[in-house]
Image: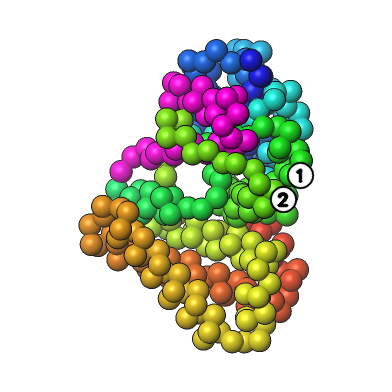
Amino acid sequence: MPAVSIVVPTCNAEKHVSRCVRSILLQQTQHNYAIIIVDDASTDGTPEILREIPLKTKKIKVIPQPKRIGSYACRNLGSRTAQGDIIVFTEPDCVHSPNWLEKVVSPIISRKAGAVQGIIKSIGSGVWVELEKARISLYRGVNTKNFAIKKEIFDELGGFDESFLLSDDVSAGDVDFYHRMLKAGVSLHHEEYAVVYHYWPNNPLEFLSKSRMYSLGRTQFLLKHNPRSVELIARRNLVRYLAGRVLGGALESFTKTKERIALPALLKVLFFHYYLTFYMLTSRFLAMYAKNPKLMETDQMGFMQR
């Protein structure tokens, strides 16, 4: 059977990383697999925890980084180290169902698809958890919390774009990869039985902070793939842009939420305002970066140092 390499980027993940690794080691699978953990210059207790983990099993390799390079660069580094025919990406704040690995690689082994997107479920409950679940249900792209791909395909696509620097995986590097994957004709299979459980933010400040980071990632994606959006902002045609992106996008999201998600009316209103904030922040970032392109990298590095 093809060997599998599981790549886990970490950054200040002392609260969850042990639980994540334990759930992977307890997988009920016939596949030969290895875990590659790339630590992105953590400043909490993560390095100490990671120094202990490999002593318990030879399946784990830890690659510490002396300086922050970003989560996508960490994934690329892990994939270059990987010996397996299949690369599986996950994150340290995830817990994996017992048959997760078996299910997420099965469509690749059976040649149904070149890549597989698994299901992400929430740990915990509350208003903000429900809003994050609603956002994920509308997500378009691959999500690196639960994603598998043939190493050959990943290498041919050049891996993730490392210019998407945000370290806590809330930028658009995975959306960018999905965009390039579709252009290359790679088939993506959605596997409903490959399940990971993720700790969602459960307070308004953290939720809004992530909204800002998502907006920054979205802005970088538009700068790379949709210059017309930048042109509209550069010409100061803000009314046209806001009408098309802010109101149109938020209303579309609200409509989809109403159709697909059984949320109380209050949550639907909150969800609408969340997307309204998202598109307004995106337009603000575009306006700033159209005037000063170097500012984007400065902002990303600022997020990484938080």
* Nearer-the-camera pick, 276 or 143: 143
Label number found at residue 161: 2
Residue 119: percent from the left, percent from the top?
Answer: 44, 38
- Kind of residue at badge 1: Gly
Q: Which residues are magenta?
A: 97-125
Q: Is residue 80 left or right of residue 266?
A: right
Q: In this orientation, does residue 243 appear? A: yes
Which label belongs to residue 158?
1
The answer to whether the residues at label 2 and label 1 have Cβ atoms under 8 Å apart is yes
Q: Amino acid at mark 2?
A: Asp
Quick check: is 107 in the magenta stretch?
yes
- How far apart are the two marked residues, 2 and 1, measured between alpha carbons? 8 Å
Residue 101 position within the rendered picture, expressed as x and y whole percent measured from the top left: 52, 24
Whether 20 is drawn above or below 293: the answer is above
Q: Quadrant of residue 271?
A: bottom left
Q: Nearer the viewer, mark 2 or mark 1?
A: 1
- Residue 198 lies in the magenta stretch: no
Name the residue: 67% across, 64% down. Answer: 225
Disc sitting over residue 196 in the figure = none
Q: Quadrant of the N terminus?
A: top right
